[in-house]
Structures are given as structure tokens and as C-alpha cells.
Image (cartoon, coloured by chain):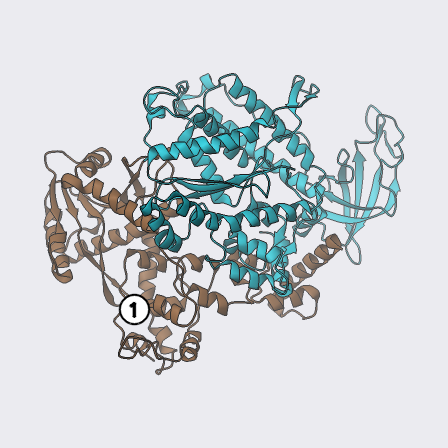
Chain colours: A brown, B cyan
Amino acid sequence: MTSPERLRGAAAPKSHNARTIAALTTNPGCSRRAVMDAAGIDKERLAAYVGFPARFGQSQFAITRGNVFEAQLKADGCAELLRLLREVLGLPIPQVSYDDLESVDQLDARADRSRELLTRAAGGESGTLFDHPLLRLEVGGRWVYLEPDLIALQFGGTFYVVEIKSFAVIDGQADGTKVSAAATQAAVYVLALRRLLAEAGHDPGLVSHEVVLVCPENFSNRPVATLVDVRKKLSVLERQLARMARIDPILESLSPDLTFDLRPDSSGVPQRPVAELVDGLGQIDARYSPECLANCELAFFCRHEARGTTASLGKSVREELGGVPSVDLALSLASGAVAPADDQEEAAAMLRFAAQLRSECLS
Amino acid sequence: MSALTALARVSAVSSGVAQRIATVRHVHLSDRPLVFIPLALAGEANAPLAALVGSSFDSPQLLVVLQPRNRDERFAFAARLAAVFLSYVDSFRGETETVPAGRNTDPRERYVDAPQILVPNGGGVGFVRLLGRSTRFRRTEGEYAVEPSVPLLGRWLTFFAERAEYPGSSLLLNMTGALGMHWATGQSAVEDANLAALVGWIDPPDGMTGADAALEAEDPLTWPPAGPATDPTFDNEILAPAIEAGSLSRLESALRRQLEPTWELMWRGVSLLRNLPPGARVERRWAEDRDAFTGYASYVDEGGYPQARRDGAVAAAQRLARLERAQVLYDAQRAYDDPLILAEYRLTGEAFAGTVTASAPDRIDDSGKRRVLRPRVTVSSSDPVRFEPGVSVVSPARPSQTGRVVSVSPLPSGFEVVLELSGGMGRGLTAPPGSVPEVGERLTYTTLTESYQAPAAFPAREETPWTHGGPPVEYVPDDDDAVEEWS
């Protein structure tokens, strides 16, 4: 049995944000990611050090555009946003007040102040916008600070999470992947806000399962707001967070000596032999699939390790091959060089037929 | 993904090179395609940044936007693209042929050839669609006037983008999609979206395996992304300073370096596809594309409106039904043209192959009022035949002849199938030689059919039922469309 602290070593824990929590839901069966994240290990740095750097660069043009759009919406006490929210939520005009919580410096103090204001508001009835609130969510036994773009309280007491994104909605349609990612992130905020209210003795149902997604419309900078239902995302998220809280069985199976400490010298340069780290990574099972490439910093390492598996060619390839795990085995069964195990009879017959068809048609 | 393709993928892993999953080419390939590689500025809604465009490998034309966030420069880019694009499209509006009247159609004229646009990937098709959307409504006079070629370009781009959704159309092809239809690599579909990696697997450089080539292709310094998205590091380290400096020559050379490797890949893709023999029904589908091209060209000439932002209820339902019919026909056509595609249906029990062991070509069915020629053949097959008696099947070797399954009986290995044939034998009571399969002939029979399917009936536009919003307001482009921001 080892502990998250021991695994991480002397490095400061890498904190989660809504995006990394959302990424957890994409491959829930991966023990390696679950352990790394629970231990707060800097996966990006680790991957780069063992020779498989992640490629998650962000263009400064995209960042600038996002910031400009958000600033435009929040200018003059959120004037533009209020107009939109009045439309989609029926936020009453005279009762809107605005609290900017960013003015509080310290993280804990900001989180406390946010909790205080939000729980107090839960009892009242006023239409309020909370800007830069700071929420906390327990992930794998540690508190994670989360910063939703905005929370709106509707007249009548329902809270709405507002998510501002700079991808365009053109003629009522937007990029499905981007909408889905935004909805998952927003679901993380909904969950955190619900837990906050529940702790304070309020009904978590006060937080709507619909989030307000604000995007630029068509080719302009004009914002448009859409309500997005995140119920499905919420249930996936809750299941995955519950699973992360139960990583003890995985930790139990690991050697007590196992650590991913990079042992930096006094100038911060890692001194740990790479082979030791690679060996350590190998001790925790990964479940690589090509989708990891877009979601996990360790993906290129895991892909390298998964060479020769049918899963590395995509989930559907493995399924079409009757679940046969390795490329070599699939080919041996197809050629008849290897006799199938009892549970492989059906897959083997199909593979032999497929191989016969291919050679018949290509000869 | 079929099991045959999955097996081809694992074979590719072990052999180190992509494996064929088609024996013939299923797309039309023009002698003079227009290769179009667009780049967009990150973070913006389809803001053009640059494009490399041209219809011959030796003469790519580079179009660059000096300040991608400037509205006027975007329209200037569209105007420059229009000059290249529209003259290419117009060059196909010469010779026509007369198509004789059909069952429900009058005789009509059709251009003997049509333009073909090639983009690197699905993102390229999306770029064409969105650039069409952002330019087709523009006004050529008054406030925010643009060059007359700009809205015309928008309508043509929209036409091509819509046609790209049509199964079997080759007017606008994306290269990763076209190559992926014919080869299976030893990597995943996610990784196949990278054109350089895909071409690396299909045609690895000497001394390299496909896997090596694909790995090298992932380095954005050697193989910049094929667009429309650019490499973020390029954006931050090269593009941003060049835009900041406002130097056209610097920007042009930077963007040319980003685009040229993809230009080369596109033409390598073209020659890889050209080396495949075309399927027998490719020409028939291209004729439909030529019909569509001819039809849209005359619609534009007659001053028709630009395509609406969204289809009305009836138009949307009709479009969907058309796409579904086209998909069914396209699937059948590919299977008829290509034994390897047909093999996928044999694997799933929707087809079987076998050898004719008995044939009664002169058999007459006199049980009805009229004596009819109904030859019977017995086919012995080692495939797992899963057909019930009564099912109708067709052999690609005699597409106009239908076989009804009379009986299926197991053999020591495989099955014996008795079929009763009708059609494709003339009108007499004796079958012309060759029209009935002879003993010893090897054949494949399938339930797939390419026979004419009548289109579904839909109400007229003005009779749209209230459940679907009632008759839509007639679409007339208005000022809102014309002055829409593009910022």
C-alpha cells in the first residue's frame, strides 16, 4: 500500500480545474489516470521528462479572442449579459444586483465569501449576478477550487451557471464537440454549487440542471445565450468522482516504494533516472484508447506502450475483431496458426473467414 | 468499421504498410481538380488567414490576409479567391451533351465535365461551407458593398459543401476521407485524420515503415497541420510577430512554409488514387454530379436566390429522404463494383458466393395463367448462408436478373442454394445464351439492390402541415443578411 503523497513525492500537488475534472469522465476505466490525478501528480511534466511530451498548445489568438469576448459581455456591470439573461431566464430588470467576488484576494477567503453570499441568496428572492465566484469540490479526497464564469440567481430562487465560450453559434448550430466540452465543464460547476448549498442545509435542487451557454452569434461579436441541459453529464461526473474516492484498492496493489518524484536538484532540474519512472508507470494499469490523445497529458506515453494492442487502433476495431486483445493473436487466429481458446472459438471462425475473403478478393 | 477493415488494420500493423480495403476506386477523380488548402485564424469564426489554391501541382497560388481580424481584408481575400475559383468553375461550362428523356424526365443538356474541389480533410469541407455562408448574402451596392464576385463565390461554395454531404458525390472531396475509403492503416481513425500520417502509412518513404512515417508526420515542424486549424506554436512564435510587424512578405513566406508540405501531400494523394482503376459505376455517379452542376449553374444564371440559412420543414424532409436513398444506392453500387466490399456483406450473411453445380435454363413455370421462363440454378457455397426461402437476391454479374431463394440445404461443408431466376433473359420462352449462369460459373448473390426506388411523397411547400410550423414564409434575402457583421 502506498499513499498519494508518497506517489507524488516532494512536488506541490497539481490542482484540478473544471477542464481536468471533465477530462476524468472521458476514460473512467483508466487506473493510471485515476491514480495520477488523485495524487495530484503533474502529468504534463512527467510525460515530457520521460520523452513523450503532450501537445496541448493554445494559440494566443484564441486566448485573446476569448478574453475580449468575456470582457465585452462583462463591461458596464455586465450590461450585455443582463440583456441576454433577461431574455432566456426572465431575470427581472429592477431587481438585478451584481456582486463581483474577485476583489477578495486570498483563495480560501474568496471561497468563504462566495459561500456566504450564495447561501444567503438561496434564502432570498432577488435577481442577482455573481461574478467570479469561487467554489470548492472534493476530488479524490482533496479540495479543488473552481471558478465558474458567472452564476445568476433568477427571481424565484433558482441558480443558473453561466458559461461564456468564444466559439461561434452559426444559424443556431455550433461545433458539437465544443458544446459537449463546455457542457461537461458547466456540469462540474453545477455539482460544486449543489454540494455547497446542500452543506448549508439548502435544497441542492435550487441549482438548475440547465446551464446558460453564451457564445458569439454567426460571424459577429454579438452574444447569444442558449440553455443547455447537463443532466446526463452530471450523472457521469458524479459516478466518476465517487469512483475516484475509492482508489484505495488500486493504491493497495502498488509497491510501497513506488513514487513519481522527479527529484529535482537545487535549480529545479529533475535528476531521477527516466527508466525508474517508466518502470513505475508500468506498474499502474492504463486503458489507452485513441481518444486519450485529445484528453490526457500521458497519452503519447500510453500509446507507445500500447503498440501491438487492438485497442490502440480504436475501440471499434477491437470490437470488430471479437475482443481479441493483441494484433499478433488476431493475425494468428485468422491464419489458423494458433488454436483458439474456448471463449475465442466464435471470434476465430469469423477471423478465418475474413482472412479467406481478403485473400480471395486481393489475389 | 467492418470486421474486414479491422483485420486489414491489424495486417497493416504487422506488415508496416497500409492495406487495401477496396479493389477499385470509388470516387471520380478529375484530370484537372482544384486543390484548395485553407487556413483559418484560431479563435475566430472561420476567419480566413491564408489559402493555397490551384489546379496544377506546379502553379499553386498563395492568398494571404495581412490582418485577419479586419472585415474589409476578409472580403478582399474572398474576392481574390473568387477570381481563381469562379474562373475554374466557368472553365467547365463549355461543351454539353444531350441526355435523352427518361421515365419522368424531359431531355436535357448536361455539361460533359464538371469542376472538382479537393480539400485536405473534413475541416476543409467545413471551411468551404462556412466561407460560403459568410459571403453568399452580401450586397454589391450600398452600405458594406462587396465585389460582385464575392456573393457569387459564396453560392458556389455553398453548392459544393451541400453536395459533399450527398453519398457518392465527388464534386467536393476531402483527401483523408477519400484515401481512408481505399486503405486501412495500422493506426486509429483519430490518427488517420492527419493527412501526413495517413499518406505516410499508404506510401512510406524508402527504408521507413508506415508507423515510422506516421510518427514523423506528427511533428508539426516537419509536417505542419493540413488546416484549417494552425499549429498553436506557429501562431505564437511566428504568425503573431509577423502580423504585428504588418509585413506582407514575411507573412507570405511564413504561411507558404506552413502550406507547401500539405500541397505536396494533396498531389501525392491524387496520384495514389489515380493509380487505382475506377469502379464501373463511378462514371454513372459522376454523371449525376454533372447534372447537379449543370442545374445549379443555370439556376444562378436565371437569378435564383442564394441558398437559405436553414431549410424549411418540407425541404429538410425531402433532403433527408434524398440523402438516405442515395446512401442505400451508393452502398449497393460499391458492393457491385468491388468484390472486397461485397465480401463485407458475405461476412455478415447478407451475401454469399459459390459455384453453379446444376442449371436448368429452359425451365418453364406453367402454374399460372401464362407460361413464363423461370430457370433454376443450384449454387454450392462454403459461406455461412443465412437466407430463408423466398428472399430475393441479385448477382452483380447480372444486375437485371433477380433470384428467388427456393431452398437452402446444408452440405458436409457449406450449403447448397437453389435459386429461381427471373428477368434479364429477354421476352421469349428460351433464355439467350449467357443469360443464365452455367455449371461451373462462380457467382456472388446479395440482397443489396440498386434497382430504382420511388422517392417518398411530401406535401408541397405551401401545404406544410401545422405540426411542422405551417407554410414557411417565402425566403427573400434582406438587409439583415447583407449587412451581417463579420468581425
Pick whichever, A55 or B58, lies toward us.
B58
Placement of the N terminus of chain A among the 4 image quadrants: bottom left
Mark 1 residue type: Gly
For image coordinates 44% across by 30% down, the residue present is B79
Pick whichever, B156 or A95, lies toward us.
B156
For image coordinates 56% across by 20% down, the residue present is B298
| Residue picked out by circle 1 | A40
Q: Quadrant of residue A126?
A: top left
Placement of the C terminus of chain A among the 4 image quadrants: bottom right
Chain containing the residue with disc 1: A
The correct choice, above or below, for B277 with respect to A27 in the image is: above
- Residue B297 drawn at (x, y percent): 55, 23
For image coordinates 28% across by 62% down, the residue present is A16
- Residue A225 drawn at (x, y percent): 27, 38
The correct choice, above or below, for A342 with respect to B352 in the image is: below
- Residue A13 drawn at (x, y percent): 26, 69
- Residue B339 drawn at (x, y percent): 72, 47
Secondary element at tag 1 = loop
The correct choice, above or below, for B299 with respect to B393 in the image is: above
Residue A156 visible here? no
Residue B187 visible here? yes
- Looking at the rendered structure, the number of numbered marks drawn on it comes to 1
Question: Along the horizontal axis of the image, is B471 left or right of B113?
Answer: left
Question: Along the horizontal axis of the image, is A132 left or right of A5?
Answer: left
| Label 1 crowd (10 A; few <14 / some 14-19 / many >=20) | many
